[in-house]
Amino acid sequence: MNDTRTFRLTKIDWRWLVVTYCFLVLFHLLPSLLELSLWQFLLSRETWQFALWAGGGIALVSAYVGYRSTGITILEPGIASMLYMATLIPTMSKIRDIHATGYRLVGLLVALHLIAFLVGCFGAAVGEWLQMQREKKQPARS
Amino acid sequence: MSHRTDSPEFAPGFIWQIILLTFVVLCFALYSRGQEGSIGKMGVASPTSIFPWMIGGKQTIENGLRAFSGKPPEPPPVGDRAKALGPVLITLVLCPTVFFLEWRRRRLAKAPGAGRPPLRISRPFYALCGLVTVFVAVAVGPIAFFGEISRADLRHAQAVQGNRDLMINELNILAVDAAQYFILPKSFGGGGRSFIGYSVPQTNAKTEGAFYTVTATKNAAAFRATSTRFPSCAIQVKVDSLRHMREWIYEGEFR
């Protein structure tokens, strides 16, 4: 372990933020679009199923980013996940079709973005943990 | 700037290359969403699907509608052909080729203990091709299987319906024949106001669609038609002295 592992919440590496967003689009949105037939066959695009599917993808990609990046990268995947959710809702979900009043709809959208942020941070934290485990093992081998 | 900018995490130009790739993918997503909206009203799946039979299905429906209007079927437009061919080439040719070649190259060039290399655009591209290849390999089987099942069900339902229509038509002909028998005097070979003695003519007793039997009483002739193609399916109907067909009973899959 070195001193670059100091947890700095205010420092955001914009490059990892951009890369996380790009990874989410490339490895979650694109396969989902390509597999639309299977997707419709397996799951509908109702709200909770959509949230489950999106949350799983966000967690996996964020975990990879947390694992791959040097140093602590937790906020970046969280913010990128929020931005990705803002992209995902108009392109993939049927949330705009649900019958909800303005307040409820806004509340639902805020909740989804918040969940995306938390899931992104959680996935990244898991990735960081895996990275630390790997770094602990490496000196022992050498 | 971050404390990590000095670390060689990214290859030169990686950020711009991945942004460009993402932009292209987002344009594709928005385009496909628009296409889905316009075609989804017809109940046809998205044309951006990687499966060409979706576009083939759309073409079949359109040809069916044209045939229903008395127009001859048309070959698919060039745009639809391109929509089918493009994804097939990308997902079934390009992605597996890139994935397996890169996979082989990585295996050959694997250097143990070389450390973690910086991220290059080839790495996400390779991963993307691998993802698409695996997805296609996993998805094609079940979709083809269930698609074939639903097509077979549809063909069977159409065959049953066609057989039923044919039998109803032939029963109508038999009803006319029975009514003629009822009206004709016995001296002319008829029943003389009775169905007794009536039998199904030899030419109509067994046809391509069914075989027919009749039970005649004085005032009614009860026909039973049993399908030859679907032996569990049958139709029973009674013809009265006024040639009214009543008490229709459908058996088996005709119900």
Image (spheres, grey):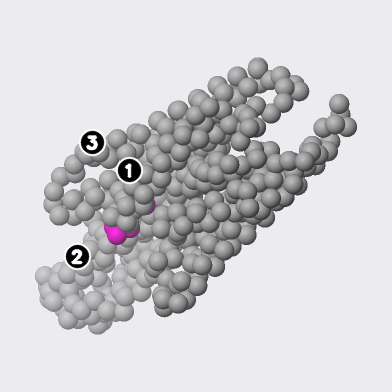
- Which one is closest to the eye, mark 2 or mark 1? 1
Residue visible at 47% across and 76% down?
A104
Compared to residue A57, the image places residue B244 above or below, namely below
Query: Are the two marked residues, 3 and 1, in contact with CB atoms closer than 8 angstroms?
Result: no
Q: Would you name the residue on which mark 3 appears? A: B78
- Residue A88 picture location, percent across and down: 46, 55
The type of residue carrying mark 2 is: Ile
Q: Is residue B5 visible?
A: yes
Residues in magenta?
Answer: B41-45
- Residue B123 picture location, percent across and down: 57, 30
Magenta segment, principal secondary structure? Answer: loop
Q: Residues within 10 Å of mark 1 (few under 14, many from 20)?
A: some
The type of residue carrying mark 1 is: Gly
Chain under disc 3: B
Considering the numbered disc 2 on the image, is that residue within a helix, a strand or a loop? helix
The type of residue carrying mark 3 is: Val
- Residue A13 picture location, percent across and down: 59, 44
Which of pointers 2 and 1 lies earlier in the amino acid sequence? Answer: 1
Residue visible at 51% across and 25% down?
B98
Residue A130, image quadrant: top right
Q: Would you name the residue on which mark 2 appears? A: B173
Chain under disc 2: B
Q: Residues within 10 Å of mark 3 (few under 14, many from 20)?
A: few
Mark identifier at residue B56: 1
